[in-house]
Image (cartoon, rainbow, N blue to C red):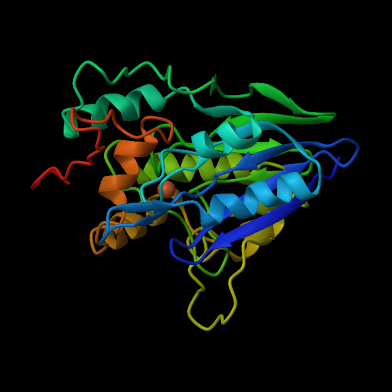
């Protein structure tokens, strides 16, 4: 079955969020929503999330799921905000506990921060199935960029998170804690074993050199034939290329605020005794 898919591109973080709708009912899922964050001012805004909520309300949709492909390091998740406004269950991969353990320590989050994934409504495992109205979906565990990364396969579409980017841009970095280029290669092979005509929806696009427009939809067949990091490469060549390239990359602008919010399923840390919420900056840790 082919879902109805509406993409929302956030140019500030190069992130694509999706509303994935059952063609035969009002049921939908929201994949990888964005809470706008002005780092200089320490201020959140809901413009991007409000666009998704307006779409849901305009079309009379029922949000069944708020799906996160992983703990994003480049934007804050708006899942709890959207959940408060229009409902839906927040899902992520069960290896979120690994990410919570790692970054709970980095941010010295203390005992208030549970590291059992309980902030999320659903922890998915490899091959778990879920429904969006009459649409059926299943989960591929596709680690490498992070240990908890998932690909959501919904009808004839797959939401690949940070595994593959568009064929002319390549693949996701693997140098965050718990990342692994070898593991990413294996995960990408899993995605590319889906039928060639499967539509793939990217989590990010940065325009590739020579391309003027943003793009986020391709197919398994296109990625297999054209992906500049994968096509015609061996596993060893990929690992060497990925590790060499990752060594040159700076940290994403919003990694420090993003991770301490997203490891809590998009909730802010508890307010301090003056009622204000603070985000920490761990010095010389990342
Ligand atoms: Fe990511």
Quadrant hosting residue 133: top right
Question: What residue do we see at 22% from left, 40% from top?
Answer: 278
Q: Quadrant of residue 84?
A: top right
> In the depicted view, which residue is nearer to us: 253 or 136?
253
Which image quarter is the N terminus in?
top right
- Pick the residue in front: 64 or 215: 64
Q: Can residue 277 be seen in this view?
A: yes
Residue at 18%, 34% in the rendered image:
106
Q: In this view, does 25 lie to the left or right of 205?
A: right
* Point 18% across, 21% down: residue: 110
* Left or right of residue 83, residue 239 in this image: left
Q: Is residue 89 above or below residue 38?
A: above
Camera-nearest residue between 81 and 232: 81
Seen in the image, is 193 located left or right of residue 13?
right
Q: How many marks?
A: 0
Seen as rendered, the residue at the extreme front is 274
Q: Residue 199, how many percent across, how many down?
A: 73, 52
Q: Position of residue 61 (x, y in %)?
A: 78, 39
- Residue at the limit of the structure toward the right, as seen here: 24
> Compared with residue 57, is residue 150 higher up or lower down, i.e. above or below?
above
Q: Is residue 179 visible?
A: no
Residue with the most extreme left position: 284
Q: In this view, does 168 lie above or below 97?
A: below
Q: Residue at point 25% right, 18% down?
A: 112
Image coordinates of residue 130 in percent, x first then y, are 70, 24
Say whether residue 146 is left or right of residue 286: right
Residue 96: name its quadrant: top left
């Amino acid at each position: 079955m082919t879902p109805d898919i509406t993409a929302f591109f956030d140019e500030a973080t190069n992130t694509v969020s999706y509303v994935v709708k059952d063609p035969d009912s009002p049921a939908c899922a929201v994949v990888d929503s964005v809470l706008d964050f002005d780092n200089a001012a320490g201020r959140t805004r809901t413009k991007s999330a409000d666009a998704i909520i307006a779409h849901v309300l305009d079309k009379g949709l029922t949000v069944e799921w708020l799906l996160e492909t992983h703990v994003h390091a480049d934007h804050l998740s708006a899942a709890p905000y959207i959940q408060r406004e229009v409902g839906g269950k927040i899902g992520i991969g069960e290896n979120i506990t690994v990410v919570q353990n790692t970054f709970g320590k980095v941010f010295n989050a203390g005992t208030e921060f549970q590291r059992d994934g309980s902030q999320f409504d659903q922890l998915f495992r490899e091959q778990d199935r879920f429904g969006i109205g009459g649409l059926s979906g299943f989960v591929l565990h596709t680690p490498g960029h992070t240990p908890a990364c998932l690909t959501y396969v919904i009808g004839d579409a797959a939401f690949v998170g940070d595994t593959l980017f568009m064929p002319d841009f390549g693949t996701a970095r693997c140098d965050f804690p718990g990342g692994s280029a070898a593991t990413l290669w294996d995960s990408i092979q899993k995605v590319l074993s889906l039928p060639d005509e499967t539509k793939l929806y990217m989590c990010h696009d940065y325009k590739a050199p020579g391309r003027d427009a943003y793009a986020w939809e391709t197919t398994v067949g296109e990625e297999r034939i054209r992906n500049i990091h994968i096509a015609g490469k061996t596993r060893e060549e990929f690992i060497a290329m990925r590790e060499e390239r990752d060594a040159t990359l700076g940290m994403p602008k919003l990694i420090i605020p993003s991770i301490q919010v997203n490891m809590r399923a998009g909730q802010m840390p508890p307010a301090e005794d003056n009622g204000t919420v603070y985000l920490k900056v761990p010095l010389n840790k990342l």
